[in-house]
Image (cartoon, grey):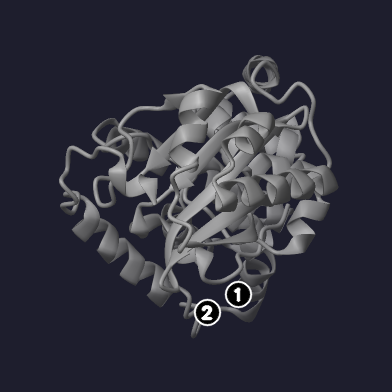
Amino acid sequence: MTWDTLRSDSGGKLSQNRAARHLVDVTVEKEQEPPMAGTPDHATAAFVAHRNLLFTVAYELLGSAADAEDVLQETWMRWVGVDLDEVRDQRAYLVRITTRQALGRLRALGRRKESYVGPWLPEPLLTSPDVAEDVELAESVSMAMLLVLETLTPTERAVFVLREVFGLDYGEIAEAVGKSQAAVRQIAHRARVHVAARRPREPVSPAESRDALAAFQRAVQTGDLQNLLDILAPDVVLLTDGGGIKQAALAPIVGAGLVAAVLGRIDSSRSLLPAQVNGCPALVVRVDGELDTVLAVRLDGGLITGLYAVRNPEKLSRMERETALRR
């Protein structure tokens, strides 16, 4: 497959942060065993009831499932120290803790991205069909939207997500981000305008997305350049994320001709299977049964305007099992 022909200045070596991320992965696996023994039943029940919601909040703020899991662990540690008799709204209180922890981590994550090898893409999630049925949730966790959210400041991102996706009132958001309600209203307006300018002009339905993905899959599998050109927007952008571990382009590939040329040379022996990734149709590429690449698409008016190829193996662990997302 042509991913391997794309240049990487790492020579396939492990990135310096791989060992650190491995420790995070170990923490995540341990965190799956609920660290709740011996805690008050009502605190545990409240946390478990809202856990999928809290993960979704953290993930939308960070774009990283591993970091979102760490945020949940930090949220839990703070939650068990709270006097629940003083908490009027457990959902809002938990979201506030999660948001504060995520904001601190988001700023640190921004520094890590500055030294990342090549384009940084969000960690893809294998999601269940019910996520796509919630159109607003599916859009909010899509690879395309997460990249739009990357262009906001951390506070703008938190305000936008909490207001537009999770429907918190301005008072609740103000407490979560440490701003006045008046400031939050201004931030929300600014973020909405910013995001609206970068949203697809002609959104497509889930059925149209599936049809477009099927046509794209056929064109890639057959190597038919004309069919690829027919479905790619003239200014389509392909981003590939190898993280310095897998070979990938170090800069965006722009234009239907260049993108079609890359995709048209994919080795036909590699399997391409449709999947729902981050609430949207995508292709999963396997080599000898092993997960190699997740290829997510952005559609606008029936044409593919963005392609996001995640090859970094550190980001693919969530593709082996479904992740539950809620709002």
* Residue 257 location (% of width, % of height): 51, 25
Q: Residue at x 43, y 72 (%)?
A: 31
Q: CA distance from mark 2 to mark 1?
A: 7 Å
Residue 88 picture location, percent across and down: 73, 54
Residue at the spot of label 2:
39
Residue appearing at x 37%, y 46% in the figure: 2
Q: State left or right for residue 157 relative to residue 201.
A: left
Where does the image place residue 76, in percent across and percent down from the top left?
50, 64
- Left-right relation of 262 to 307: left
As helix, strand or loop, the secondary structure at mark 2 comes to loop
Query: Which residue appears at 46% of the width and 34% of the height?
Result: 261
Of the two numbered discs 2 and 1 in the rendering, the one whose residue sits closer to the viewer: 1
Could you say which disc has been placed on residue 306 in the image?
A: none
- Residue type (three-letter) at the residue carrying disc 2: Thr
Q: Residues within 10 Å of mark 1 (few under 14, many from 20)?
A: some
Can residue 187 be seen by looking at this rendering? Answer: yes
Q: Which residue is mark 1?
A: 44
- Residue at image location 37% in from the left, 34% down from the top: 119
> Which of 116/40 is in front?
116
Identified by mark 1, the residue type is: Thr
Are the residues at dot 2 and dot 1 in contact (C-beta closer than 8 Å)? Answer: yes
